[in-house]
Image: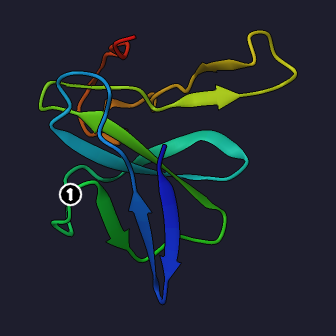
């Protein structure tokens, strides 16, 4: 599970290493709150050089961010989408439809080991 902190003029996102094998890098995706499929890549590599965190100026006030593990061939999960009015209530969040909106075009969700 990740967390975020707002520093003066910046947002700092921290996350734990991926539990799936093969994660070599992490992409930060930005979307608009209320439009839960609007996310597209903001960063595809570690820009600030600090492992498992990223510091950057925030988007507009209605932005949300996702951290997605990937290597140079495929990417992992975008996390779970939760809707208490749906059965099942937790499903895998979908990647962007356009490959140009992703860090790598192939989306493969590898289950984490038990």
Q: x and y percent of residue 66 in the render?
A: 47, 46
Q: Is residue 31 left or right of residue 11?
A: right
Q: x and y percent of residue 47 in the render?
A: 20, 64
Q: Is residue 44 above or below residue 82?
A: below
Q: x and y percent of residue 27 in the render?
A: 30, 46
Q: Is residue 31 above or below residue 102?
A: below
Q: x and y percent of residue 44 in the render?
A: 24, 49
Residue at the image position 34 percent from the left and 71 percent from the top? 55
Instruction: Please rate how many residues cluster around mark 1, counting C-alpha atoms within 10 Å: few if below 14, some from 14 to 19, many from 20.
Output: some
Query: Front-most of 46 and 17?
Result: 17
User: If the image is split into quadrants, where does the C terminus sit?
Assistant: top left
Q: Residue furthest bottom?
A: 8
Query: Front-most of 63 and 109?
Result: 109
Q: Residue furthest right?
A: 85
Which image quadrant is residue 51 in? Answer: bottom left
The residue pinned by badge 1 equals 51
Which image quadrant is residue 88 in? Answer: top right
Residue at the image position 50 percent from the left and 31 percent from the top? 79
Q: Is residue 25 left or right of residue 94?
A: left
Residue at the image position 15 percent from the left and 66 percent from the top? 49
């Amino acid at each position: 599970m990740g967390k975020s902190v707002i520093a003066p003029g910046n947002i700092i996102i921290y996350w734990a290493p991926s539990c799936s094998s093969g994660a070599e890098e992490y992409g930060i995706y930005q979307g608009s709150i209320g439009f839960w499929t609007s996310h597209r890549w903001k960063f595809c590599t570690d820009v600030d050089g600090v492992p498992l965190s990223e510091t950057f100026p925030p988007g507009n006030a209605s932005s949300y961010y996702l951290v997605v593990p990937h290597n140079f061939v495929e990417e992992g999960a975008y996390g779970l989408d939760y809707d208490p009015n749906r059965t099942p209530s937790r499903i895998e969040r979908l990647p962007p439809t356009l490959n140009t909106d992703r860090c790598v075009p192939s989306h493969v969700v590898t289950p984490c080991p038990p």
